[in-house]
Amino acid sequence: MAERGLFVVLEGIDNCGKTTQSRYLKDYLESQGLPVIQTREPGGTEVGEEIRGVLLKNRARMMDPVSQTLLFYAARKEFIVNVVQPNLGKGVHLLTDRFEASTYVYQGYTQGVDLRLIDSLHDDVVVAACCKPDLYVILDITAEESFRRIENQNNLGQDHVFENQGLGFMRKLREGYLAFAEKHLEEVVLLNGMLSEQDLKIQIGLYIDLLLGERTDVTGKI
């Protein structure tokens, strides 16, 4: 029976560089001869991508936060059943751009959704499926830096539903991520997202090596 793959999530406020680092990490693991899938959440499945389109569509008024939460967990359930469980069970390492931390931060901390609702959904959808991530990597940048990066990038065609809520909203998101990191010390690595891409690449690689090394210490092989 194959050893369970690693489940690693990259998180942070918009434009923190998580997708770039996820791509670097995928290349690194593949260079070690390890099977790996890079994906995103919400998304990763046909249903998940359809829900993503509904959630991130720009509207005159943003969708009710509880409605957002329920849709995110509907997409998450599809993601777990169709992507997470089958691949981790085969020993494939999974890298995802966002997961549950985003819900706690964007809908809970920032928009005021009752955390008891999110906790309940967490238990029913994630814990019951034994699909908690092995590691969250949060890239921390300021709200001002997030907006500066928007201005310096070609983001045509991308969804900006949360960025469009303004600087104050983005500052609240950052506070939420810092609070999440403080509350989940054993499963979160908080990194300075203002470092160069190469420095972050090295730091993240070291943490992944530690996780893989722990498995080697126990089993004698990866």
Image (spheres, rainbow, N blue to C red):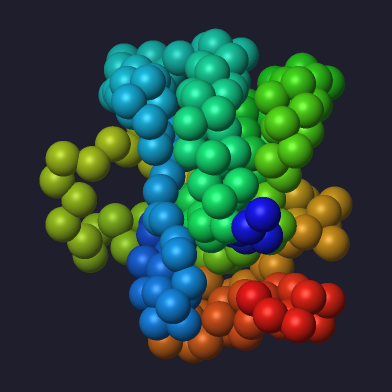
Does residue 72 appear in the picture of this structure?
A: no
Q: Residue at x 81, y 82 (%)?
A: 217
Relative image position of residue 13 (x, y in whole percent): 51, 52
Relative image position of residue 125 (x, y in whole percent): 69, 25
Farthest residue in the front direction? 1
User: Viewer-proximal residue, 48 or 180?
Assistant: 48
**Residue 77 vertical position relative to residue 14 in the rendered view, above or below:** above
**Residue 5 vertical position relative to residue 199 in the rendered view, above or below:** above
User: Viewer-proximal residue, 34 or 74?
Assistant: 34
Q: Image quadrant for the C terminus?
A: bottom right
| Left or right of 123, for residue 8 | left
Q: Residue at x 75, y 49 (%)?
A: 180
Q: Residue at x 40, y 74 (%)?
A: 30
Query: Which quadrant would residue 122 be assigned to in this image?
Result: top right
Does residue 204 appear in the picture of this structure?
A: yes
Relative image position of residue 86 (x, y in whole percent): 54, 40
The number of numbered badges drawn on the structure is 0
Q: Residue at x 39, y 14 (%)?
A: 61
User: Viewer-proximal residue, 147 or 200?
Assistant: 200
| Left or right of 151, for residue 105 | right
| Left or right of 196, for residue 112 | right
Relative image position of residue 212 (x, y in whole percent): 67, 76
Query: Which quadrant would residue 43 be assigned to in this image?
Result: top left
Q: Image quadrant for the N terminus?
A: bottom right
